[in-house]
Amino acid sequence: MDLHTYCPEKLLTPEKGVKKISNGSRVFIGTGCGEPQRLIEAMVADQTIQDIVVYQMLSSTLSKYVNQRDFLNRFTLKLFFISVAMRQAAFEGKIDYIPVYLSQIPELFKSHEIGLDVALIQVSPPDRFGFCSLGISVDITQSGMQAADIVIAQVNPQMPRTSGDSLVHVDEIDYLVMHDEPLVEAIPDIKNQQIVERIGHYINQLVDDGCTIQVGFGHLPDSVVPYLSGKKDLGIHTQVITDGLLPLFEKKVVTNRNKSYLPGRVVASLCMGSKKLYDYVDNNPMFYFRSSEFVNDPNVIAKNDHFISISSALEVDLTGQICTDSQGYLFYSGIGDQVDFIRGSSMSKGGFSIIVIPSTAEDGSVSRIVPHLSEGAGVATTRGDIDIVVTEYGIAELRRKSIYQRVIELAQIAHPKFRQQLIDEAKKRRYIFPDQMTPSSQDLIFLDDYQYTIALPMGKHIDFRPLLPSDEFESRNFFYSLQDDTIYYRFFNKRKVFSREMLQRQWASVDYRRNMSIIGWRQIGRRKQIIAIGSYAEADDNSAEVAFLVREDMHGLGIGSYLLEILEGIARKNGYIRFVATVLAENRKMIRVFQKRYPHAKLIRAGGGEVEVEMDFEPSES
């Protein structure tokens, strides 16, 4: 459509366009990388424009002016989210932060709870039918535009055309300003590549093929997403598309074919990244841009089965409370979309949420896992909403768990130098028992090499990994599920009580080298259930004593033999050349398991009806 022919009366220069803003107006500005830079510059440059209240979700261009001498006398900035560019201004009290869920902002405009006189937006040139596109900024821009009395649009040929709720007819726009300029780009810096790699490694373990994911605001979620590049048929339903997702699009990791809601489409509200990303979404029918009230609605999110929300935090306390928008009394970012997506994921069939957070801040001097949130820090996500927390030291599963269990899970993934302090503080607050032992101060990343899976009939499987302090509760359930004969064969007595003290001693003695315990577990709904435990402990410099237990209903499936194989592999790495075991002579099943793997095992009769079994490892092939 030729605008000069269709509506010449609407075409204005930037300077004349902003003259339509009356003093005292409430002005909405389009979001983030979609903001109309030239219109903002013209508005600020016009000294006759006074006493303006600006509403914006993510602000970039205004950061260039906020420190000018007379700017704050003329403009009051009310932001729903504090961008990196505006953070210092927030610390200095130069902006007014509105803490509200993104899904609720459009209704604030529609109901005129927040009244708008003018909307400054940016659109693509119209097609032959007169439809422009809001492009990479639909989010709250669509509702802000619809609620304003006057709409002034910067028409920029560099704005991508996107489908969904993004189309705006020129008849809905009061004034048009033609101006060609590059869009704002937002490429977050990766602050610590090693931390990113390690957190990405754990995220990769949590996300299965065919899941639908959301990626929250922030450099860390964006940075870890490329570590999903080995997955298949992922779907996307997210507030913001970033460059971190580009590798997944280009490698066809994201196909959206398994999505249970809007299959085949990437559902999003805005796009923030590089020109390469903007070119990728331009006229790409895979992308379906909708407003924030739709994309962030927990009921809409929940229509996606196996939905996983990935977002970040500033702090998490030992009870599971999350702070995202402030450092103490200093407002840092915003509530944003986190709570919307966490609650949507919890309602999704098979869904859950992940909070990613480095274990420390300020060059390692401060723990981000804390006994209590900093004074002044706001609780964005409550302890009742939290599912999983991931640091570079591992995965903490908090969903539906007690405070006691949460403390152990979180201390386990805190930086090693802060673990003792966290346990001590938890004891002072009566979160845990006074005799609670502290998780190992080792960096246990090497344990990720000790994870295994065995396939069972009917498509089932059993996973194996080293025993951790957080397994204490499930270990208890495992031992009490065993029959008397099984317990007698393992402990040589009819033990009836498996106390906390005994279970703590079991994991506290595990140093993962001289002393190792491996659990076998299976997923039952949202719960992990232990069905086997195998251990070895150093007997002398060359030998380790081995023992294991398998729940009776899992006998005959080769689980004991597989545990023995796993334990031998780990023992070899740690310099042992044989296993020894003490078995009741009547326990023929256990003896057969040993003899099957070690045909030349020596059986030596001991007193009390016991048999000593010596099992030399076969020489390793080199």
Image (cartoon, rainbow, N blue to C red):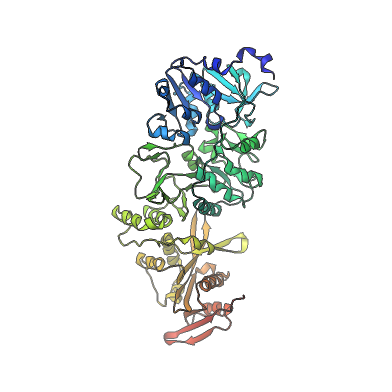
Place of residue 64 in the rendered image (x, y in percent of width and height, measured from the top left)? 48, 29
In the displayed structure, would residue 583 be above or below residue 182? Answer: below
Of residue 552 and residue 117, the one placed in the foreground of this image is: 117
Q: Residue at x 36, y 66 (%)?
A: 499
One can see residue 231 in this view:
yes
Q: Residue at x 66, y 44 (%)?
A: 250
- Residue 515: quadrant of the picture: bottom left
In the displayed structure, would residue 482 be above or below residue 289? Answer: below
Extreme-left residue of the structure: 428
Q: What is the count of numbered marks?
A: 0
Place of residue 123 in the rendered image (x, y in percent of width and height, measured from the top left)? 60, 25
Q: Residue at x 62, y 61 (%)?
A: 458
Extreme-front residue of the structure: 69
- Residue 91: quadrant of the picture: top left
In the displayed structure, would residue 264 be above or below residue 5? Answer: below
One can see residue 259 in this view:
no
In the displayed structure, would residue 619 be above or below residue 527? Answer: below
- Name the quarter where the C terminus is drawn: bottom right
Place of residue 176 in the rendered image (x, y in percent of width and height, measured from the top left)? 60, 18
- Name the quarter where the N terminus is drawn: top right
Extreme-top residue of the structure: 9
Place of residue 280 in the rendered image (x, y in percent of width and height, measured from the top left)? 65, 37
